[in-house]
Image: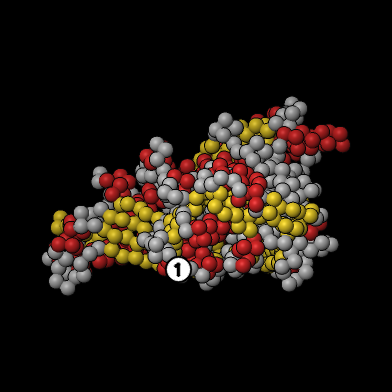
Amino acid sequence: MTTTEKHAMGKGMKRKEDPRFLTGQGNYVDDLVIPGMLSMAIVHSPYPHARIKSIDKTAALAVPGVKAVITGEDLVAASLGWLPTFHGFDKQMVLAVGKVLFQHQEVAAVFAESREAAMDAAELVEVDYEPLEPISTPFDSMKDEVILRDDRETKTNHIYHWESGQQDETEAALAEADVTITERVYAPRCHPAPLEPCGCVAQFDAMGRLTFWVTSQAPHVYRTAISLVTGIPEDKIRVVAPDIGGGFGNKVPVYPGYVCAIVGALILKTPVKWIETRTENLTTTGFARDYHMDVTIGAKKDGTVTALKVKTVADHGAFDAAADPTQYPAGMFGIVTGSYDFPVAFTELDAYFTNKAPGGVAYRCSFRVTEASYAIERGMDLLAGELKMDPVDLRKKNFVQKEAFPYKSALGFTYDSGDYEGTLDHALTLIGYDELRKEQAEKRARGELMGIGISTFTEVVGAGPSKHFDILGIKMFDSAEVRIHPTGTGIVRAGTKSQGQGHETTWAQIVAEELGLDPENLLVEEGDTDTAPYGLGTYASRSTPVAGAALALAARRVREKAKKVAAHLLEAAEDDVEWKDYKFSIMGAPEKSVTMKEVAFAAYTNPGEGNEPGLEASLYYDPPNMTFPHGTYIAVVDVDAETGEVKVRRFLAVDDCGTIINPVIVQGQVHGGLTEGFAIAFMQEIPYDAQGNNMAPNFMEYLVPTAVESPVWETGHTVTPSPHHPIGAKGVGESPNVGSPAAFVNAVMDALSPLGVKHIDMPLTREKVWQAVRDAQGAA
Ligand code: PCD
């Protein structure tokens, strides 16, 4: 077996980047040390809503080593007071001027010779606040009794209304339905909480060129945004995203700290580093979810669904900094019809400002897909309960059938491919569903609470196409460049940026497969805007669907070029040469062949008359559609009625992400995402009290599961390739986070169903479960 055969597509090659990560030798932003570099610290507001009467810098400036303190007024004077948010509906104050709008909002930035001095001085910046009444819920906000944003022309806290689908038809179908269920389900405010918080280093060189090292999931977009905000010409900006310790959507937006660091480096003429603290990360940077969803499903007696209506109230905090594509204020929430063939559907959403941190980032989901998936998968279980049907039978009755693809949903998406029943059946066999139901019946007879929860989700990932998707007007295509060196090794670049996903391995495997080369010797480079082709970055599981396609096609371009050289080496007409078994050979005479390695050398030494020397290609890819991965997740839980403790005894995830590039990486992606989904279902929330205080500003309150708490994950796969992707691959990184919360909650509700408990909002903490059991017992 050649190394290509051993390592190319579909093989579980070990991650090429891991030796560096596993030996503590990654290069993160905070590892960068430049002589003379200053440290920046930020002053945060203790109040969620207050007027700023005055700011006194004197005591801070007196701290030894402190070089400067800047405030919002200083930035406004330099026309840098506001940041555009990525989808373009709103803007965000860089440093507060006049009023603070959420607890921990950035009020001033301090620059000093050491991090310690900067932090000490930040505590000495004296801000005189006049506290105002805060608004902590969108339901209070919508009354418009107090208008939070005086900078906006419209005097209301309502940000936007969005709707999709057939309202009248849906209402009519619901009125006629034999059975309807309605439930308000809340996807609580949570936070991506990457292990490495956000940070940056800004440096101007003698020629006035800015190099900006930053924890960014989208370096090119940052370069353009920085140019637009600061007026620095784009050619005078280099953005470098070095190794990143997890992004999860948190590192998509541009944050106030970045602007302050650049301003500091500019005025103080020395490099500036800013590294967030954990509390800053949890309290000021992009939160996720905070959607209150009223789900209504109508069905016939036999369980056939006839209509879906979902009405959402969204809490966007003080600024609408959701990182959604311009035309999609509620992201891809339209996937809320899920895997089911709803004849009609209607969804509407209203978003409001509150005195909470801004954000609304796509935490491991393609912009609000997790919320949508949770709503429909909970809804289907509630309907099954109402109809007294097994949730498996209800789902099977309503699945979009395998033959129906491409399938146009009632809310307008065209699903590319899927086999929902096949995947569900595979999962039922793997987990031994019938046996589990038997066991459950026995336990129930003994009064024990065992639950089985199912989620058969469909996702939409891989934005573009560019006619629908853009960030700040920049179209959501992606790009790749493949250069093969004379000795048959090469360098591969893409417009994406790994934050741990393993692109250094999978991108090499895609190119190796197309070119018959060894992926070990294809260096993958991402994240430096001076060298990478322009791309929109890595989030929304878009890298494989978009850049992955660009890589395969760029490699095929290289192969076309190589074919001409091969024809010259084989002394044959180009039309008589074919690419087979990772080699060029003469059609009908396979013994006469040349390898890509031989061709690569010839491309630089003996390309042949009329053939262009060298062996490289670059390509921009605008996908014709998105990809629609799906899966069946099954959770098995035991609930202790006395303590409210939920034990997740088993969890199986069967994913279908089309053609798999690297099964080991895919499994790792699924394990990681399930652990996050488990945390969201059972322990994580960023709640605000009625006074607007953030109640989970650190890891003592915001719980991150370790290996000790996490269940053992079982995985499986089915493969339904995407028909429009050059290698048939769909995204997978987000699926476990999208599909699992509903499986966990459905399992707990199934366990509690004998008591008559219908729904508890996440996180399902012991206390909440215990309380629900008590209330149910009390009522009985
Ligand atoms: N794959 C394979 N095959 C298939 C698919 C896929 O192999 N079929 C693989 C690839 O290549 C890569 C991975 O896997 O490596 C992933 O992919 P995707 O799905 O395409 O994705 P991406 O784009 O690359 O990435 C993104 C994602 C997201 S979205 C998130 S959140 C998360 C995930 O990813 N993040 C992270 N994962 C992860 N991991 C890690 N480690 N880290 C991190 O941070 Mo967002 O929207 O941002 O929220």
Mark 1 neighbour class, 10 Å CA radius: few under 14, some 14 to 19, many 20 or more: some
* Above-or-below relation of 23 to 96: above
| Percent of width and height locating residue 685 | 68, 44
Q: Residue at x 56, y 45 (%)?
A: 64
Answer with left or right where residue 209 lies relative to residue 304. left
Residue 159: tell me if it is visible.
yes
Colour mapping:
secondary structure
| Percent of width and height locating residue 626 | 51, 62
Could you tell me which quadrant the C terminus lies in?
top right
Q: Secondary structure at mark 1?
A: helix
Three-letter amino acid code at disc 1? Glu
Q: Residue at x 52, y 44 (%)?
A: 114
- Where on the picture, by quarter, is residue 563? bottom left
Could you tell me which quadrant the N terminus lies in?
top left
Answer with left or right where residue 245 lies relative to residue 332. left
Q: Which residue is mark 1?
A: 234
Near-viewer residue (446 or 615): 615
* Above-or-below relation of 658 to 673: below
| Percent of width and height locating residue 533 | 39, 63
Answer with left or right where residue 572 lies relative to residue 581. left
Near-viewer residue (285 or 314): 285
Q: Is mark 1 within 8 Å of ligand 1?
A: no
Q: Residue at x 77, y 46 (%)?
A: 689
